[in-house]
């Protein structure tokens, strides 16, 4: 959740950044999404590195790196320097994200692991929305640079907590495991239908999610006349509703609701809801209600996909690499969503963004159907 602070600090700070550094709308889109670049390029490789170096070590390293990059970014003199800092924040973020799930599973009983993964899937909406609220409190009277320093301070405190509390836990020590060459394991995962379908489904989900949450503060300010702090608080409230969907997915799957019903039902119904957020003629209160409904319902998708990893990983020891591929898909979607949205809005106004959300969620539903087909064949007696 503290790692996700690096994601959540940017949306409410965009107006301040644009005023201070003169960033265009397209550059603002890249400031939102470039943090996903390192994951999009190397999520699976980082996961396999964690398997060999030790997940605890990389979790601490990633936390320190994100904090240092955020601190340096607070003193960026221009947009280009800030973008470089965001890249290193992204590297720290993904290092933490791929390392922590394995540590959580080693600390929980087998009977509790599904619940643990459902709770884990809340890290992004819970962490990013918490940082949005903090930014809303900090921004009035200061600037985005103070927000960056707050995120850096939070990372430093978390790193200290990990050093004090996680390092002495011997059950988190690296386990000796016979491994194949890294490239061979990457190829094995990348050519497996199940992990690929999960990554595609998560990627198109994330494309739509980051497009909406990333630009919601700007939409609220430009279209509805909200202040910066109010827009940040409203966006945080919308984002935190995603947690209810994450947890609901675990509840539904525990009661044997088919995974395909959860994924396809949510993505197809919410494609209409997401379009309503951007199109013209929608009353302001209804627009906000649609954003909240979208966030709450679509949250079942990550919860359903994380629990599919153990089923579709080519081998048990490649569950971490499969999670890394999922995160690559997620971050490719997060990388592309905001810049495409920014370009569409600059070209045809806010209603143009509805084309992206509709297409992305339709593809996500199709990937969910393909995953269901694979699952039926894999689990067939």
Image (cartoon, rainbow, N blue to C red):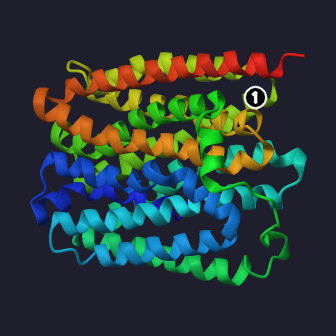
> Could you tell me which residue is drawn at 28 percent across and 46 percent down?
217
Query: Looking at the picture, how far across and down is residue 126, in whole percent?
Result: 54, 52
Is any part of residue 88 visible from this angle? yes
Query: Looking at the picture, how far across and down is residue 58, in whole percent?
Result: 61, 70
Disc 1 residue crowd, few under 14, some 14–19, many 20+, Cα 10 Å: some
| Whether residue 313 is situated above or below residue 201 in the rendered picture | below
- Specify the quadrant that holds the C terminus: top right
Determine the image quadrant of residue 101: bottom right
Q: In front here: 232 or 84?
A: 84
Is any part of residue 139 visible from this angle? no
Q: In front here: 130 or 89?
A: 89
> Could you tell me which residue is drawn at 65 percent across and 77 percent down?
162
Query: Looking at the picture, how far across and down is residue 364, in whole percent?
Result: 50, 24
Residue where numbered disc 1 is placed = 253
| Whether residue 130 is situated above or below residue 238 in the rendered picture | below
Q: In front here: 108 or 364?
A: 364
> Could you tell me which residue is drawn at 42 percent across and 42 percent down?
332
Q: Is residue 211 left or right of residue 41?
A: left
Q: Is residue 179 left or right of residue 353?
A: right
Determine the image quadrant of residue 152: bottom left
């Amino acid at each position: 959740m503290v790692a996700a602070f690096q994601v959540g600090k940017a949306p409410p700070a965009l107006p301040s950044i644009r005023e201070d550094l003169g960033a265009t709308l397209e550059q603002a889109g890249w400031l939102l999404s470039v943090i996903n670049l390192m994951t999009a390029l190397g999520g699976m490789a980082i996961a396999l590195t964690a398997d060999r170096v030790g997940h605890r070590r990389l979790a601490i390293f990633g936390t320190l790196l994100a904090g240092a990059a955020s601190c340096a970014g607070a003193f960026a003199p221009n947009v280009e320097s800030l973008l470089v800092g965001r890249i290193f924040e992204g590297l720290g973020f993904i290092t933490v994200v791929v390392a922590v799930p394995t540590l959580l599973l080693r600390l929980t009983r087998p009977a509790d692991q599904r619940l643990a993964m459902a709770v884990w899937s809340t890290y992004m909406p819970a962490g990013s929305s918490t940082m949005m609220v903090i930014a809303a409190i900090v921004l009035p009277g200061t600037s985005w640079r103070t927000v960056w320093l707050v995120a850096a301070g939070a990372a430093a405190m978390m790193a200290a907590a990990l050093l004090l509390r996680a390092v002495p836990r011997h059950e988190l020590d690296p386990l000796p495991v016979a491994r194949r060459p890294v490239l061979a394991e990457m190829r094995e995962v990348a050519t497996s239908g199940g992990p690929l379908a999960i990554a595609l489904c998560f990627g198109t989900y994330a494309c739509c999610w980051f497009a909406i949450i990333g630009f919601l503060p700007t939409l609220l300010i430009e279209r509805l006349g909200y202040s910066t702090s109010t827009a940040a608080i409203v966006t945080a409230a919308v984002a935190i509703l995603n947690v209810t969907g994450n947890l609901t997915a675990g509840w539904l799957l525990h009661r044997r609701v088919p995974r395909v019903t959860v994924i396809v039902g949510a993505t197809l119904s919410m494609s209409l809801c997401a379009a309503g957020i951007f199109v013209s003629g929608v009353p302001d209160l209804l627009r906000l209600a649609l954003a909240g409904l979208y966030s709450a319902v679509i949250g079942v998708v990550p919860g359903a996909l994380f629990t599919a990893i153990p089923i579709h990983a080519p081998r048990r020891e490649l569950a971490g690499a499969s999670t890394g591929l999922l995160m690559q898909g997620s971050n490719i979607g997060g990388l592309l969503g905001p810049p495409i949205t920014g370009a569409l809005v600059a070209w045809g106004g806010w209603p143009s963004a509805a084309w992206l959300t509709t297409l992305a969620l339709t593809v996500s539903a199709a990937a969910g159907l393909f995953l269901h087909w694979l699952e039926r064949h894999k689990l067939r007696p």
